[in-house]
Image (spheres, rainbow, N blue to C red):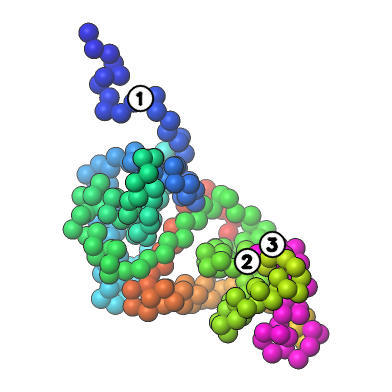
Amino acid sequence: MGKLRDLFEKEPDREIESVVKVNVHTPKIVWMELEEYIPTEEVKENFRRIIEGFIETKRGYSEEVCVWLSGFFGSGKSHFLKVLGYLLENRELATPDERVIQTTSYIATKLGLQNLAPLISKEFRTKVLFLYLLDYDPTVDHTLSRLIYRSLKEEKGFSDKIWVSLWEEEIWREGKYEEFKEWVGREFEWVWEDIRKLRAEIVLKKALTVFLGFSDESEAQKAIEESKREEIRPSDMVKELKRYAEEIDENKGRIVVLLDEVGLSCVFG
């Protein structure tokens, strides 16, 4: 007589994460989430509609740039969102048996979208921002625009403090960012990514005179104080997203922002 477990294709007592969080990118966890994703025909069709709409942007600007996912608690919205992100941004992912897969091709095959995979991976260069809204502090990010703007700066390797990232990017645009980090190491005997967490103002007050042509530290200090009061409007956020997409590739660059737990997060103005 056979055993009940013989009816299962996979081991029924295998470890499975109970909650999918879009901003968790540990390879082992991501592989499990992608491997365990079993889409219905309706889900596959929804993926197709979104991807075909995304591909249409190759022809020019489109008004249909947003998608809203709705469903009951536990219906798989977060899982859908994360799979979508890894489908659009063609990441390399190591499997438990040490193979390396391209996520776009792997997911497209699972969804029956093999014919669209080459278009996604070759005709676009896409960066996805995975934002889990329940993890953010409303005292820091009191508007959605500010959250997306700050997350974009972090994605580019800049500080999680907006006013610091503004000066970092200004120095970067002057083509002096690597020189600036080397200078910080010599002048302060610290790695910039470490010292900026606590002493960014002290460093930048001097750096602005060296790298951005400020006449003295007093003038630099005034500029720093003004940058701390900088408001991030929706138009600022949109311009920054567009600029980053063009930095990736003037024609093929795309930025996709995935917001998870919007319905439970009522903290943004």
Q: Could you say which is closer to the camera, residue 129 or residue 170?
A: 170
| Residue located 39% across and 24% down the image | 13
Residue 194's label in the rendered image is 3
Q: Which of 102 and 252 is in front in this view?
A: 102
* Residue 42 spot, x, y in % from top left: 24, 46
For mark 2, what is the residue? 159
- Residue at (23%, 62%) from the top-left corner? 118
User: Is residue 98 highlighted in magenta?
Assistant: no
Residue tagged 1: 12
Label 3: which secondary element: helix
Q: Is residue 166 left or right of residue 14?
A: right
In magenta segment, residue 214: yes
- At label 3, counting other C-alpha atoms closer than 10 Å, the crowd grade (few under 14, some 14-19, many 20 or more) is few
Residue 251 image position (x, y, % from top left): 33, 78
Q: In which quarter of the image is the N terminus?
A: top left
Main SS class of the magenta portion in the image: helix
> Which quadrant holds residue 72?
top left
Q: For the magenta stretch, what is the residue range?
A: 193-218
- Quarter of the image for residue 223 reads bottom right
- CA distance separating discs 2 and 1: 44 Å
Q: Which of marks 2 and 1 is nearer the N terminus?
A: 1
Residues marked 2 and 3 touching at CB (< 8 Å): no
Q: Is residue 62 above or below residue 138?
A: below
* Disc 2 versus disc 3: nearer the observer: 3
Q: What residue type is labelled 2?
A: Ser
Dot 3 amino acid type:
Asp
Amino acid type, label 1:
Pro
